[in-house]
Amino acid sequence: MPVVLRTTLGPKTYFPNISRISFEGPGSDNPLAFRYYDENRVVAGKTLREHFKFAVCWWHTLGGTGADPFGAPTKDFAWLRASDPLQLAREKMDAGFEFITKLGIPYYCFHDFDLVAEADTLAESRRRLDAISDYALEKQAESGVRVLWGTANLFSHPRYMNGAMTNPDFAVVAHAAAQVKNALDITLKLGGEHYVFWGGREGYCSLLNTDMKRELDHAARFLHAAKDYARANGFKGHFFIEPKPMEPSKHQYDFDAATSIKFLREYGLDRDFKLNLEFNHATLALHTMQHEMQVAADAGMLGSLDANRGDYQNGWDTDQFPMNLYELTEAMLVLLQAGGLQGGGINFDAKTRRNSTDPADLFYAHIGGMDAFTRALIAAADILEKSDYTRLRRERYASFDSGNGRAFEQGQLSLEALATLAAQQGEPEQRSGKQELFEQFLNRYL
Ligand code: XLS
Ligand code: NI
Ligand code: NI
């Protein structure tokens, strides 16, 4: 099939009524301006641009048509109309780069087949990926926009209905490996900083027909092979596992941060892999995002974030844009105390609602998300710098700072020694946890 690289339509704009979004300050009533996000503003020692490394995701933002299990697409975007797959891919890329540069976002993230539609054979898919990545390289050079991470879609095609790297059929595992090899090559070619594995169908629908141990062993073998290949080809970035407990599988192996960390350590992958955590995945696992971030930070694996939010009424991945200032401020408190993300950034893995059908809605969504993160980060920095938060939290543990508490922490007290001390000291004095006082800080600095 001939590869078409140049559009016959000539240069066109997909967002003609929208110009470069600028920072206008909190007093502005322009919905197409930032009220808080000023990329050069310094907060807690770094610019906002450096703290966040925001990224646009190719799938929901450019490919999200509003189709759901109950209804047809609602969004007839002008960049998704061409009949030739490469022509469509190129127009989508024109729209994507126009969108990203108008927002002043520095990065994007993609699955292989977000860039261009999958073909009938691996070889033809590869030819398409080579062609569209040539075009992406030109657009990147022209705009300075970069790739935060790439990934392979190992969950949409019917061949993956029983999983990809954990599929019980070796032929499917090998096919998935070929796809990951191509996705790694394209990520490397585009200078992608990192590479993500999200295991949507790596799990099971029923344990009755599943050999879990064997499937997990296969996943580890697969990840080692992918890592070895990428390293041998000069990839310097991190690999990220993206935990999610369920959906589309009934039970996914990368359930949450703790489960994923245990897996990486058990199989000797913990030096190359960190976590890409997503807000809505955290709440699906019945955690909070701040919990997941703290677990990852304590393991030295707080790599990158997928930004979105769930809905309190719904038990699925609604992927709404992040607007909840309380949730974000608690997340930013963990982020600042952890010293930031380890190499990654903040990818808007979020979709506008099915009935938000104007191209401008994509701008409102990202502007709102970037402003919300900014307010949250500033509030978190103020809480840490100006309030009693750190001191109060440290004081809860003061009894371990000296004397017998210190000796216990250092492993110097046996169970018998502890029992003797308890007998001497009598019933412990009550100490308040002061949760409401801690909660006041959020409202005070937001
Ligand atoms: C789906 C995941 C997916 C990953 C990339 O729930 O969030 O979008 O981020 O494969
Ligand atoms: Ni998700
Ligand atoms: Ni995600």
Image (cartoon, rainbow, N blue to C red):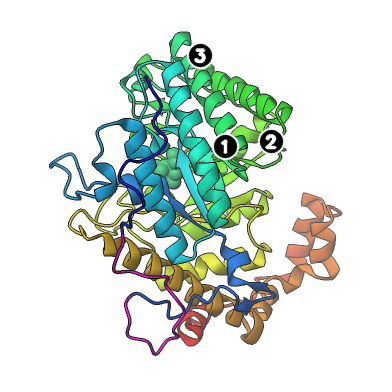
Residue 121 % position (x, y): 39, 15
Where is mark 1, residue-wise? 187
CB-based contact (under 8 Å), mark 2 and mark 1 = yes
| Rendered image: mark on residue 235 | 2
Magenta portion: prevailing SS class: loop
| Circle 1 SS class | helix
Q: Is residue 366 above or below residue 44?
A: above
Q: Along the polypeptide, which appears first: circle 3 or circle 1?
A: 3
- Residue placed at 75% from the left, 57% from the top? 419
Where is mark 3, residue-wise? 174
Q: Foreground residue, 299 or 129?
A: 129
Label 1: how many residues lie within 10 Å, few (<14), some (14-19) or many (20+)?
many
Residue 214 % position (x, y): 53, 16
Label 2: how many residues lie within 10 Å, few (<14), some (14-19) or many (20+)?
many
Q: Is residue 154 magenta?
A: no
Of circles 2 and 3, the one toward us is: 2
Q: The disc labelled 3 sits on which kind of residue?
A: Ala
| Rendered image: mark on residue 19 | none
| Circle 2 SS class | loop
Q: Along the polypeptide, which appears first: circle 2 or circle 1?
A: 1
Farthest-out residue, bottom: 27
- Residue placed at 54% from the left, 54% from the top? 142
Q: Foreground residue, 1 or 293?
A: 1
Q: The disc labelled 1 sits on which kind of residue?
A: Thr
Report the number of discs.
3
Of circles 3 and 1, the one toward us is: 1
Q: Is residue 20 magenta?
A: yes
